[in-house]
Amino acid sequence: QSREPDDYQERPAKRHAGDVDMVIEHYNLRPEVGVKQRKESPIIGLKSFNNWVKSVLITQFGHPALAAAANKRGKVLDMGCGKGGDLIKWGKARIREMLAVDIAHVSIEQARQRWETMRPRRFDATFAALDCYTEPLTKVFSPQQLAEPFDVVSMQFCMHYAFETAQKARCMLKNVSEWLRPGGIFLGTVPNADQLLARLDQLPPDSEDLSFGNSVYKIRFEERTSRPLFGHRYYFYLRDAVENVPEYIVEWDNFVQMAAQYGLYPVFKKEFHEVFEDYREHEDFKQLMVRMNVCDATGASSMEDEEWEAVNIYIAFAFEKR
Ligand code: SAM
């Protein structure tokens, strides 16, 4: 199903602007809540599980690349960092420096504040508001800040917004690859296109409502048959987190093919439930699951069935720059 770059279907510019505004407004308006309120979220089990998967990914693929940095303390770029939910994970990775960007300036401020109040604050960090799917990192970072290449680039739960157009996906990949050293790692989490499209196909043929999900999450497509590689839009709702924000299907083979044009090659791809199966018995990650409240000491999950279904729409991935 591969296509030449010139065949890419682009959507009218006006529609893009509206979608991006919805994304920015949504994330800017989501309040930063304290630790106590976070723990009381109705989807705390799901959030903890997502954090555990990110920790596994960062430990398994980020740590070796960081350890191979010249002075064994590497440099990370977090694209779409949000409110800085991964700062502690990077602190544990003993990095030297982080640069972080997000399109939502309110989130960037909150991430900066979170980093400033971290004790101990183990690494230097610079935060900047940037639409990294349309603009280069050089817009917000100086040549000195970019002089030393990154060992790891992380994109957690945010890359799918770039697949609105081929141009945005290319800009995103250029930003990932341009300042990543050879042997460096690009890792992330993204919805699983195969699963979303399979669920769409399973809807009754005469159904006008093209949505599926449960009380925790809902996905609504706009049409059934047209499957463009870019701009294949659906609306996503996640209880207590995301309110019907437009997102785009990331067709894996297309992503891999494009990434190769930027020197990025896949080394890992797993659905979240596979990550759970593969790492639940691993001594370090098993203990981490208890510490992160993903399950209790007996191994019983803190998630309801509906939360399990919601987390399983995601995949985790890692690419190596060659
Ligand atoms: N990575 C964080 C995490 O794992 O907690 C935040 C994930 S949140 C679901 C998605 C983030 O992607 C939001 O903070 C949003 O503002 C950001 N985002 C969406 N489009 C973006 C763009 N064009 N450039 C930079 N960030 C973007």
Image (cartoon, rainbow, N blue to C red):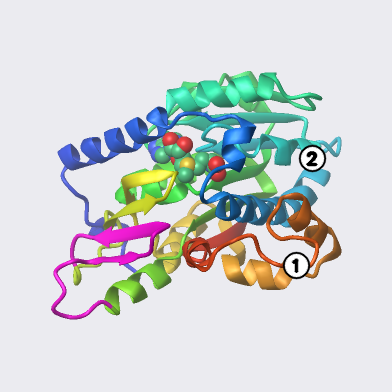
Circle 1 SS class: loop
Nearer to me, 5 or 277: 277
Which image quadrant for residue 227?
bottom left
Residue range in magenta is: 203-223
Q: Look at mark 1 in the image and give the residue it sits on.
A: 299
Image: 1 above or below 91: below
Q: Tell me the kind of residue under disc 1.
A: Gly
Q: Look at mark 2 in the image and give the residue it sits on.
A: 92
Circle 2 SS class: helix
What secondary structure predominates along the stretch shown in magenta? loop
The x, y position of residue 182, in whole percent, is 68, 48
Image: 16 above or below 290: above
Nearer to me, 106 or 73: 106
Query: Quadrant of the image for the N terminus?
Result: bottom left
Viewed as shown, does residue 174 lie left or right of 236?
Answer: right
Query: Quadrant of the image for the C terminus?
Result: bottom right
Viewed as shown, does residue 271 lie left or right of 74?
Answer: left
Nearer to me, 284 or 241: 241
Which image quadrant for residue 61?
bottom right
Residue at x 31% of width, y 63% of height: 4
Is 22 one of the magenta-colored residues?
Answer: no
Q: How many marks?
A: 2
Q: Tell me the kind of residue under disc 2.
A: Lys
Residue at x 80% of width, y 27% of height: 122
Structural distance between the alpha carbons of marks 2 and 1: 24 Å
